[in-house]
C-alpha cells in the first residue's frame, strides 16, 4: 500500500477539502465583506471531481478527510456526496466543519449518509456578541444544531472558538463551564493573520493559547489527555469533574508543523500543501485538460496522483509566522478550507 511522505519525513494522511467558498455568515475574521467576490460556479470543483481526487488521495495513503468551506452545508447535494465518500474503501474517517446553522435539519441525514463527526464553530455564548462576530448569525440555531449533532451521534463534537482580544476573550470561562456541563470538546483557537482586515492591528487582537491555558490553570484542575500525533494539532485536557474536554490550537504561539500530516484541496481545485504558505498546485486545470471518456480514465488518475505527489513534495518544513506579528500573507480561509 502507498503512503505519501513529504520531504521532511512526515506521513501525509489527512486531506481537508473546501467544497464551497460561500457561507451564510460573514465572520469578522474570516469572510467579513458584505459583498464577497465568490468564485464563479464553473470554477468550483464538481462533486464528481472531488470524489475522483479523494479516491486517488486515499489510494496514496490518505485515511482522513474533512469537508469544510465556506459553509459546506449550503452546497446542494451534500448528503449524496457524503454517501459517495462513504463508499471509498480505506477512507477511515469522514468529518465536517460547520457553523451549525443547518444542523437541526441535517445532523441525522449526515450521520445516516456515513459522516462520523462534526466540528462546530461557536465564538460566543452571548446572543448579541455571536451576532456581532458572525455579522448576523443566530446563536439559538447554532446551539440547537449542537443538540441535534449530539442526538444524531456525530461524536465526538469539537467546538471551534477563535479568541479575539477585546471581543470574546472575557467568555473563556463560560466556554470552560460549557465543557464541564456538556460532552463537548471546546477548542480555543488562536486568531490567524489570514486577511488584510486582521493583519491591521493584529497584534492587539491576538491572544496566545498558552496564556489562556496558564490563566485557566490558576482556577481549574485539568490533566492532559494522551493522543497520538495523528490526532490533530490541538492539545486536549480533561477538566476535573467535567463531561467534556478543552483544547488549545496554538498554530502561532507553539506551532505544530513537525507533526503536520495534512494537505488541503481548495474549492477551486488547487492543492495547498501548507495553510500558511500561498503556494498552491493547480489540479483542476490539469484535470480539465484531460478528456473524460472511458479511455481517458487512466490518464486522469495519473494527473491527479502526480499533482498530489508534487504538492506533498513541496510541503514546507514549517511556517515562519510569529504570534501576533502581521505579515504579507493574505488568503481566504473559506476558499482554502479552515
Ligand atoms: N463555515 C464553517 C464554520 O463556520 O465552521 C466551516 C468553514 S470555517 C472557515 C472553518 C474554521 O476556520 C472555523 O472554525 C474558523 O474558526 C476558522 N477560521 C477562519 N478564519 C480564521 C482565522 N483568521 N483565524 C483562526 N481561525 C479561523
Image (tube, helix red, strand yellow):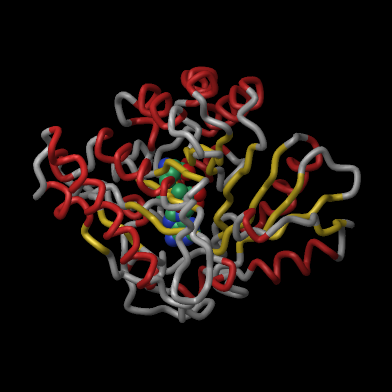
Residue 101 in the figure: left or right of residue 283? right
Q: Residue at x 32, y 37 (%)?
A: 51
Query: In this orientation, which residue lies closer to the viewer: 180 or 115?
Result: 115
The answer to whether residue 211 shows anywhere in this view is yes
- In the depicted structure, whether residue 284 falls above or below residue 272: above
Q: Please identify the quarter of the rendering in which residue 258 is found.
A: bottom right
Give how far across and how far down residue 34 sits, in percent: 26, 47
Give how far across and how far down residue 310 sits, in percent: 31, 66
Residue 299 in the figure: left or right of residue 257? left
Query: In this orientation, which residue lies closer to the viewer: 31 or 114?
Result: 114
Q: Residue at x 24, y 52 (%)?
A: 302
Q: Please identify the quarter of the rendering in which residue 157 is found.
A: top right
- In the depicted structure, whether residue 305 falls above or below residue 152: below
Q: Please identify the quarter of the rendering in which residue 4 is found.
A: bottom left
Q: Residue at x 57, y 48 (%)?
A: 160
Give how far across and how far down residue 106 sits, in percent: 47, 21
Amino acid at each position: 500500500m502507498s503512503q505519501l511522505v513529504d520531504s521532511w519525513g512526515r506521513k501525509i494522511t489527512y486531506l481537508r477539502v473546501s467544497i464551497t467558498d460561500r457561507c451564510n455568515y460573514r465572520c469578522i475574521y474570516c469572510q467579513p465583506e458584505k459583498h464577497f467576490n465568490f468564485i464563479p460556479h464553473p470554477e468550483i470543483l464538481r462533486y464528481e471531481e472531488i470524489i475522483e481526487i479523494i479516491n486517488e488521495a486515499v489510494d496514496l495513503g490518505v485515511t482522513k478527510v474533512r469537508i469544510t468551506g465556506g459553509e459546506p452545508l449550503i452546497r446542494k447535494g451534500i448528503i449524496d456526496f457524503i454517501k459517495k465518500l462513504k463508499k471509498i474503501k480505506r477512507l477511515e474517517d469522514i468529518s465536517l466543519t460547520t457553523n451549525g446553522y443547518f444542523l437541526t435539519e441535517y445532523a441525522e441525514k449526515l450521520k445516516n449518509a456515513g459522516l462520523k463527526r462534526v466540528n462546530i464553530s461557536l465564538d460566543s455564548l452571548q446572543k448579541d456578541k455571536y451576532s456581532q462576530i458572525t455579522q448576523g448569525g443566530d446563536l439559538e440555531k447554532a446551539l440547537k444544531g449542537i443538540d441535534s449533532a449530539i442526538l444524531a451521534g456525530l461524536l465526538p463534537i469539537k467546538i471551534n472558538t477563535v479568541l479575539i482580544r477585546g471581543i470574546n476573550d472575557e467568555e473563556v470561562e463560560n466556554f470552560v463551564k460549557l465543557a464541564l456541563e456538556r460532552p463537548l470538546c471546546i477548542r480555543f483557537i488562536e486568531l490567524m493573520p489570514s486577511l488584510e482586515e486582521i493583519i491591521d492591528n493584529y497584534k492587539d487582537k491576538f491572544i496566545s493559547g498558552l496564556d489562556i491555558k496558564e490563566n485557566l490553570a490558576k482556577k481549574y484542575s485539568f490533566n492532559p489527555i494522551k493522543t497520538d500525533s495523528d490526532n490533530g494539532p490541538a492539545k486536549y485536557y480533561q477538566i476535573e469533574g467535567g463531561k467534556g474536554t478543552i483544547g488549545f490550537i496554538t498554530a502561532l504561539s507553539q506551532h505544530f508543523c513537525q507533526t503536520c500530516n495534512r494537505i488541503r484541496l481548495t474549492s477551486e481545485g488547487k492543492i495547498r500543501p501548507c495553510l500558511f504558505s500561498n503556494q498552491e498546485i493547480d489540479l483542476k486545470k490539469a484535470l480539465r485538460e484531460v478528456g473524460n471518456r472511458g479511455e481517458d480514465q487512466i490518464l486522469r488518475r495519473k494527473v491527479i496522483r502526480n499533482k498530489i505527489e508534487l504538492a506533498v513534495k513541496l510541503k514546507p518544513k514549517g511556517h515562519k509566522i510569529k504570534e501576533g506579528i502581521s505579515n504579507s500573507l493574505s488568503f481566504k480561509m473559506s476558499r482554502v478550507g479552515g
